[in-house]
Amino acid sequence: MPTTIRRAVLSLPAAPLGPGNPLPALLLPVETHRFDPAQRAGLPADMARQLGHEPLRTAMPARRHDAYTRHRARTDVEAVVVENDRLRVTVLPGLGGRIHGIEHKPSGRQLLYSNPVLQPAEFALNGAWFSGGVEWNIGATGHTPLSVAPVHAARVPAPDGGEMLRLWEWERLRDLPFQVDLWLPEGSDFLHVGVRVRNPHDRPRAVYWWSNTAVPETDRTRVLAPAGAAWRFGYERSLLSVPVPRWDGADRTYPLNSRYPADFFYDVPDGARRWIAAVGEDGHGLVQTSTDVLRGRKLFVWGAGPGGRRWQEWLTEPGTGGYAEIQAGLARTQLEHVPLEAGGEFAWLEAYGPLAADPAAVHGEDWGAARAAVERELERALPRTAVDDAYAAWRPYADLDPKGDEEILATGSGWGALEVERGRYRLPGTPFDPATLGEEQQPWLHLLHTGTMPDCEDALPPEPSLVSPYWRDQLEMAESGAGDARLCYHLGVARWHAGDRSQAVRSWEQVATGHWPSMRCLAVADQVDGHPERAADRFLLAFASVRDEHRAGPAWTAATAALARETVEALLAVGRADEAREVLSGLRPGTLDRGRFRLLLARVLLAQGDAGAAREIFDQGFEVEDLREGDEVVGETWYAVAERLVAGDGPVTDEVRARARALHPLPSRYDFRMRPERG
């Protein structure tokens, strides 16, 4: 059977994504992968350098996605199927180009953990993400902002004379175009994936890439890689060198032998073949291998504790089997960013396929023998030289454009076309068609061609800001009339992103009196600068402006909800619970019924001294749809309420805390703890 590429429809229970949050994400979320710089002294020199290389200041220009729900309905999702007589590969171009499934047809095995639902959760750098399959993680430490975004897709010629599926987009955190080419050589049991990241700019860029593969997990699933040590990173935020397979009394290559979620970055020796495999009790499973540029290999485990189990349920549905992740990246760890010189590129080839090894060997006590059994079967099925040869054969085809419109299978965003227009870039293989330019790009095209932002008094909420050095220069040079709110606002956002906070504040202060987006930005700046009372006042002013306009439409509803949340948080931080309650009272019922706002109301009631009413909200039940990975606010609020109920009007002492935990244990539905409790 020759390789075929066809459009398809995948019907799944899915929760709607909802409108994007129009408020610029001036601050990064609380980063669970934050690293203590004091630990660098004991690390390899190249790792230590890359750990501090160009960390993100913000996740802009990506907009946050936090308006999704947990109400799923049967939904048709556009897919592309790549198939030969051995494998059937299902790809979702509208959701970051995620591979949803790889079916090995002769055995009938699904090689991946293929999530039966599409449920957004707060894991990406800009919010919404979903689990399962193989995701292409580009940008910076964390899950890419492209997790739920469309990418371009087309048929192009493959090296073996057939055809391959090309996915491509413009990654906006680092301002880099990338492509992912998928093809199935005739008769092959292995999906081939050619990846290229290019830097068309005149200055270096920091690059992050990890291919994340979800695999089914049982108590007899074992993950193997060619390493005798690993760098373990847990949610207590420490990076520790540990032996493989056994550490701290257990064999950690079995994911369920860990209690809490953790990353194990395998220390693969130089010169060793790059691979990682997940095998079940019978020795069957999935193996991933690559050319040597993709040096890193990682196991992520949720662990067997109640928090990890709860997260697994949260990301899919009760009764569904769990999963672990096997991953491959450009660096040893996901805390690192790798420099890419001006005009340069990173390119490599990956392969994914079935593995069948002797179960007694791969599950044996002899770790060296277990690894050797996997490597022997991998070499038999797909020799290392064959991977290198496939990469060399693919390279000339990476530059081939789709032959015509009939080969286009899906369309991504217009941001790449805008950047190509601005930079006059030639990017063979990844055409960013001017026809993809849309409404969001139009103000920036106007600025590029005329030197001014277009007049539009009604541009609220504002369109997305652009923050790269090139667009900041355009804004700095733009002709401005007195009190040009749109220009001052966007210039302030670009200056803030660049770290020039004093000038950002100056831009916003020029127009904030009549422009609530700039007033809100000033409130965020006050929080950062240690002026919480003034921040609360400014948040209130911005929220009052939004509330009083009473505009209709999803963008305005999203802005109102996002600003209300920030305002309530700011008021609680300075002990102004009564005003926070008034803000919540002014929201529409649909907004106030969301889990995030039910939690906020419980916190407000607790701050007002009504712990009983706060507890009633918990007893009634709620789900914080946008609960962030590693966020402990639900459990912390539960225990704060319990402590007040036990203490009454008295002080909260250590004895009270202990009694509260004994009398009011955290219910499993609210237990999302990803690390041991702090003492």
Image (cartoon, rainbow, N blue to C red):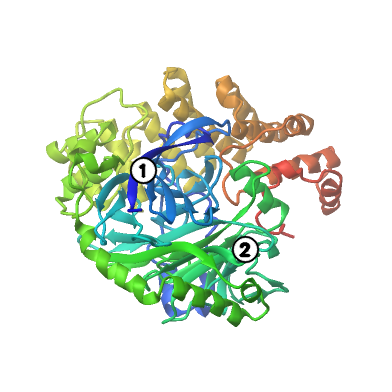
Nearest the viewer among 443 and 384 is: 384
Q: What percent of the width, then of the height, locates residue 421?
A: 16, 45
Nearest the viewer among 104 and 446 is: 104
Q: What percent of the width, then of the height, locates residue 647?
A: 84, 42
Instruction: Identify the element where label 2 is drawn.
Output: loop
**Residue in the image at 74% along x and 32% along y:** 614
Q: Which mark lies nearer to you, 1 or 2? A: 2
**Residue in the image at 43% along x and 55% along y:** 87
Placement of 579 over or under 135, stated as above or below: above
Residue 593 sits in quarter: top right
Q: What percent of the width, then of the height, locates residue 359?
A: 63, 71
Q: Is residue 334 visible?
A: no
Mark 2 residue crowding within 10 angstroms, few (<14) / some (14–19) / many (20+): many
Left or right: where 658 falls relative to 25: right
Nearest the viewer among 584 and 507 is: 584
Instruction: Identify the element where label 1 is drawn.
Output: helix
Kindly identify which residue carries mark 1. 505
Kind of residue at disc 1: Val
Left or right: where 252 falls relative to 88: right
Nearest the viewer among 271 and 126 is: 271
Mark 1 residue crowding within 10 angstroms, few (<14) / some (14–19) / many (20+): many
The label number, if any, that marks residue 120 in the structure image = none
Kindly identify which residue carries mark 2. 280
C-alpha separation, residue under disc 1 versus residue under disc 2: 56 Å
Kind of residue at disc 2: Gly
Placement of 570 over or under 502, stated as above or below: above
Quadrant including the C terminus = bottom right
Q: What percent of the width, then of the height, locates residue 241?
A: 58, 76
